[in-house]
Image (cartoon, rainbow, N blue to C red):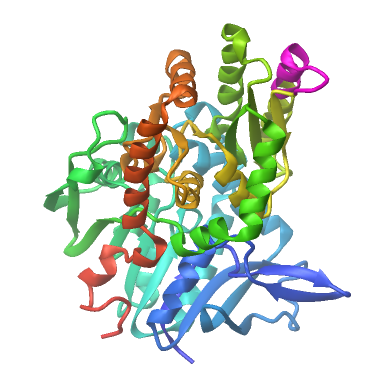
Amino acid sequence: MSSDLVIVYHRQPYEEVLENGKTVLKENKSPNGIVPSLKSFFGDVAHGAWVAWKLAEDPSNPEFEKRIEIEDEAGKYSVSRLPLSPEQIHDFYHVTSKEAFWPILHGFKERYNYDPVDWANFRTVNWQFAEAAAEEAAFGGTVWVHDYNLWLVPGYLRQMRPDLKISFFHHTPFPSADVFNVLPWRREIVASLLACDDVGFHIPRYAANFVSVACSLFDVEVTERVRAPAKWISEGTALTERVQPSMLEHEGRKTSISVSPVGVNIDYIEERARADETRIKAEEIRAELGDAKLVLSVGRTDYTKGGIEQLLSFERLLESRPDLKEKVRLMHVSVSANRNMTAYSQIQNEIEQVAGRINGRFGTLEWQPVALISRAIPFTELVAYYRAADVAWITPLADGMNLVCKEFIAARCDGDGVLVLSEFAGAAVELEDAVIANPFSNRSMDRAIEVAMAMPEEERKRRMASLREAVAETDIKSWKPIGFQNHGGTTFAAE
């Protein structure tokens, strides 16, 4: 059955769990993140399909089940699974995507590694994704491609199926031309994206950066510009952009540039936050703390997330404020992003060393200033910590959006709590009533956490009310990227 909407993303839309020797497909554990967000769009179409990879020791095995039908909370839809060998996945994802693309997208040119990239394999994998999407899509349907490791899919798909509406959404930051153009494949990548009907980003700055890159590489005309919404113009953040390009023309093709910050499932989070078991757990956490303040930090173990910089700031705080002995605890959740990559294992080791040093220097038998957690916390339990925390400390060095800070705000149905947020997280554009910090500045980081911990109740509640209003405006249920409505009249409807 052909599909009006085909979502192309590298991950499958469920988790595979081994139970009693059999593989069982289960819903994703968290209600937020890209997978459950994207699946929600299948409710808007008669039939949808999802294209992803699946590890196959032997991709040529005729018994490999390439297409399955799924029925879950999102409805009924097809999943087209591309059999990739361990070597293909390693080269495509761990090397090309993570060692070459990831550092450039986040502005870490010094971590960029070009030498081991197998570009022919990257092309081959992207071609396979494009072929699968072309087979699934109805005539005139929409194919929605997601994220940087599938950059070449739109160009290939346009060759195969010129009838389709092709949209691409970028979930990471998009850097300026002087950073992006370090990539030797820059023209091939951008040419593919210019084959789209729409290219979407979280915030205006990323859209403006993409257009500057396109104009540096091709004869591209910017035919429309719009003013960024006033609510996204904050004088206190580094990522503010006042005007954004909204339409490009290249070789007779028009490509709209849309901006739509992704949000979280507010109703679900609030339901969990108000549940009796959550309230009881939060009360237990507070009782254990006594009159000490709880500072909560949640993120992946990645050099872009600023975990080490944050721990060093906490160490300086304890050095300069001996009165905080036994009066504050930092719960630092740092979940390994990829245990098979040297760069991430090094970051994890350094985080453990710094946390251990802090506890060794300042801790007592009764009090450890840092609780370092390196495993994923079940979301229902995490919500209780959101409710119990005095401060959420979210200070990545670079982040496309960051949903943790929005989860924290959504969970604070009590209207209290303080958010300290990096000005280099995309979410900072929306959340100007957070305490904004520059993670590259010791003074800014140290001052922000002190201000947050000392903030009086009236100001805390005023800020939190504003933050909750901002998060409500980009609830995941209202996330309808503009580009689809620019092509075809109604979202996802085939012409």
Q: Is residue 274 left or right of residue 153?
A: right
The spot of residue 452 in percent (x, y) is 45, 26
Q: Is residue 392 magenta?
A: no
Q: 213 or 434: which is nearer to us? A: 434
What residue do we see at 66% from left, 58% from top? 277
**Residue at far right of view:** 20
Q: 229 or 119: which is nearer to us? A: 229
Q: 293 or 354: which is nearer to us? A: 293
Q: Is residue 197 left or right of residue 273?
A: left
What residue do we see at 27% from left, 65% from top? 483
Quadrant where the C terminus is found in the figure:
bottom left
The spot of residue 181 in percent (x, y) is 37, 37
Q: Is any atom of residue 343 visible in this view?
A: yes
Q: Is residue 258 left or right of residue 426?
A: left
Q: Quadrant of residue 472?
A: bottom left
Q: Which residues are magenta?
A: 354-367
What residue do we see at 73% from left, 45% from top? 375
Number of residue marks: 0
The spot of residue 321 in percent (x, y) is 58, 10
Considering the whole magenta stretch, tell me its main secondary structure: helix
Q: Is any atom of residue 334 visible in this view?
A: no
Q: From the viewer's perspective, is residue 420 above or below residue 313?
A: below
Q: 119 or 86: which is nearer to us? A: 86
The spot of residue 466 in percent (x, y) is 32, 44
